[in-house]
Image: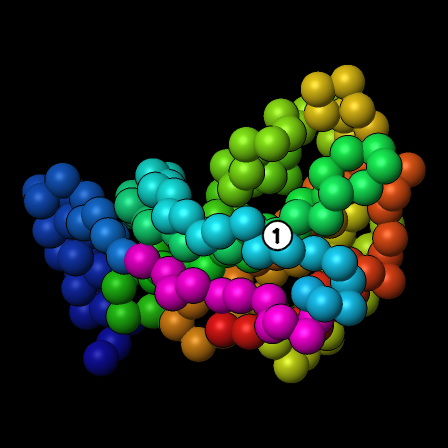
């Protein structure tokens, strides 16, 4: 197919998308991820339950080449969230494990997006738990973790939650057709990088 024919085809696809009101909404669910029992025993955390949260958001992508393709796609994702807790002298330390479907903003293209990643770190943390209302996060250091069999960079943040100084650590990894995200919220005076790394290494999906 020559360049003129390709441009004409893309124009027809764009017009078809506009006439139908844009990309269709993706409605999909993640499958629950958990922390194995031996890891919980070694770190002092207990499973407090698994809930399902509904996330309505929009994912986007841009593809450059002979033609530029940009797309935003609405998503309704059901997000299973496994919660774990360790009561410290300074307040509860939380560890959340969430799974979301990998969404293609553009049909028939390999680019996928994580719906949960559309939320800023504080909003992501608050979406997954209600014990703390986290605000005013600032970036801290990166920590390497073993996550679902691969090395992944976890990002730590410092902030406040209901007047308490907290450390929030977040890591995400793709696992097949889903993304798995872990979020730890810990009173800063009780933050323990080694314990966080052990919890992440114990995640199964």
Residue in the image at 85% along x and 37% along y: 89
Q: At which x and y percent is residue 161?
A: 71, 25
The total of numbered circles placed on residues is 1
Queried whether the magenta region covers residue 33, the answer comes back as yes
Magenta residues span 29-39
Q: Is residue 190 above or below residue 10?
A: above
State the quadrant of the N terminus.
bottom left
Task: Check the image and name the residue furthest to the top.
Answer: 163
Q: Is residue 169 left or right of residue 56?
A: right
Q: Is residue 141 above or below residue 177?
A: above
Q: Is residue 101 visible?
A: no
Q: At which x and y percent is residue 178?
A: 43, 67
Q: At which x and y percent is residue 108?
A: 27, 70
Q: Is residue 26 left or right of residue 137?
A: left
In-front residue for pair 123/165:
165
Residue under pointer 1: 84
Q: Is residue 174 left or right of residue 153?
A: left
In-front residue for pair 17/93:
93
Residue in the image at 82% along x and 28% along y: 165
Residue in the image at 64% along x and 81% along y: 149
Q: Is residue 56 above or below residue 4?
A: above
- Give SS at disc 1: strand
- Name the image colouring: rainbow
Q: Is residue 172 left or right of residue 62?
A: right
Q: At which x and y percent is residue 15?
A: 14, 48
Queried whether the magenta region covers residue 77, the answer comes back as no
Residue in the image at 77% along x and 34% along y: 91
Q: Is residue 70 above or below residue 110?
A: above
Circle 1 packing at 10 Å, graded few (<14), some (14-19), many (20+), is many
Q: Is residue 171 visible?
A: yes
In-front residue for pair 167/92:
92
Task: Check the image and name the residue furthest to the right.
Answer: 189
């Amino acid at each position: 197919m020559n360049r003129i024919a390709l441009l004409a085809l893309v124009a027809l696809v764009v017009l078809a998308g506009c006439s139908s009101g844009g990309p269709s909404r993706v409605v999909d669910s993640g499958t629950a991820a958990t922390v194995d029992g031996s890891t919980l025993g070694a770190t002092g955390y207990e499973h407090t339950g698994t809930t399902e949260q509904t996330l309505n958001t929009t994912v986007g992508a841009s593809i450059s080449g002979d033609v530029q393709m940009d797309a935003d796609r609405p998503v309704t994702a059901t997000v299973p969230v496994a919660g774990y807790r360790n009561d410290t002298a300074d307040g509860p330390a939380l560890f959340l494990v969430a799974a979301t479907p990998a969404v293609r903003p553009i049909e028939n293209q390999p680019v996928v997006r994580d719906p949960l990643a559309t939320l800023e770190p504080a909003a992501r943390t608050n979406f997954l738990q209600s014990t703390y209302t986290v605000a005013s996060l600032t970036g801290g250091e990166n920590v390497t973790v073993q996550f679902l069999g691969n090395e992944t960079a976890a990002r730590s943040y410092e902030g406040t939650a209901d007047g308490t100084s907290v450390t929030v650590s977040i890591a995400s990894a793709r696992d097949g057709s889903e993304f798995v995200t872990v979020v730890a919220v810990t009173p800063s005076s009780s933050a323990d990088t080694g314990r966080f790394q052990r919890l992440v290494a114990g995640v199964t999906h």
